[in-house]
Amino acid sequence: MTPLATIIIAIAVIVVLAAVVLVTSARRSDVRGAGALSRETVKRDKSIKAESGAGPTGAAYESTEVATRSTELAKATEVAPVAWEAPDQDAVDVSRRQFFNRAAITLMTTSIATFGVACIAFLWPRAGGGFGSKVTVGRLEDLLVQIRSDKGFVYKPEARTWLTAYPADALPKARKAYAKQGPVLAGMEAGIVALYQKCPHLGCRVPECKSSQWFECPCHGSQYNRIGEKKAGPAPRGMDRFGVTIANGNVVVDTGTVFNGPAIGTNTSGQEAEGPHCISGGGAKH
Ligand code: FES
């Protein structure tokens, strides 16, 4: 799933949760809010009406009232002014029910908003260049120099990637073996390989072995040559890898797509161990 799709799904989930909160709170205030009659009160009113029998119709009642109405002006009785009294604070202030309703809605809204912001903040780096997207790891010529000076291996944590040099004289074989992995082959043509750090056996992080010039997994002893082709151990294939593009001299590793490592037996560089192994007991060689 692309980072953009993940962000869209997260935003949709937040909107749905917010809608649920609003609908729930609106329903609660319809049913139980101030001024609404409870179900028992409505039922009691209906039963009182039923007991008192049918009264006069509205029209008959109005005719009677009109007939008895007087046109004389009635003199208003003198009423002494009433002294002002302070209103009942309980009636003026927010009721306890209102207070709890508003507090609950505020808390839920704040929680959902915080959750939403946290989700987007968590996903933002993926959309903006972290692991899972295209990562620029440096200038090609600088990286090739660094690989040589670091004895064959450079690790880029932001891309969870090992970078190694691909030998130019092995390219004819690579064009056959990696023909279906265009972006991986493009990196090889430029002289560089970007290998995923995760072992294709059970997922341990595979370290380099400077003495043998191979990768050697400490978990179950799988071994791979410097360009990640499998040499020994229980792994089902070579190390997985990423596509590489060169943009204005910079190496861009696309960590959004993982290409499966080459099948067992693929050996385009023919590189054998160049010294003692770091991990012993790597199992039978393949
Ligand atoms: S996880 Fe690497 S060999 Fe098992």
Image (spheres, grey):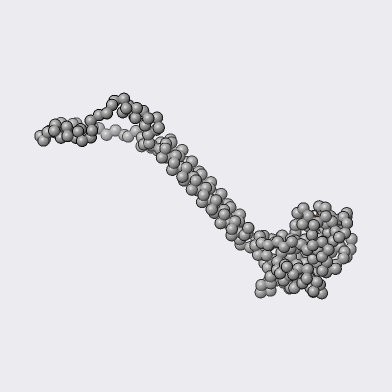
Q: Nearer the viewer, residue 85 or 53?
A: 53
Left or right of residue 223: residue 21: left
- Regarding ligand 1, which quadrant of the image does it lie in? bottom right
Residue at horizontal 79 percent and vertical 62 percent from the top: 263
Residue at horizontal 82 percent and vertical 69 percent from the top: 268
Question: Is residue 144 at least partly visible in the picture?
Answer: no
Q: Residue furthest left?
A: 72
Q: Nearer the viewer, residue 282 or 107?
A: 282
Residue at horizontal 55 percent and vertical 51 percent from the top: 13
Q: Quadrant of residue 154?
A: bottom right
Q: Residue furthest top?
A: 51
Left or right of residue 277: residue 35: left
90 in relation to 263, above or below = above
Question: Looking at the picture, how far across and down is residue 192, in whole percent?
Answer: 75, 69
Q: Quadrant of residue 92?
A: top left
Residue at horizontal 74 percent and vertical 73 percent from the top: 190
Q: Nearer the viewer, residue 107 or 19?
A: 19
98 in relation to 217, above or below = above
Locate the N terminus by quadrant: bottom right
Question: Looking at the picture, how far across and down is residue 285, in whole percent?
Answer: 88, 59
102 in relation to 144, above or below = above
Question: Looking at the picture, how far across and down is residue 197, in whole percent?
Answer: 75, 59
Left or right of residue 206: residue 38: left
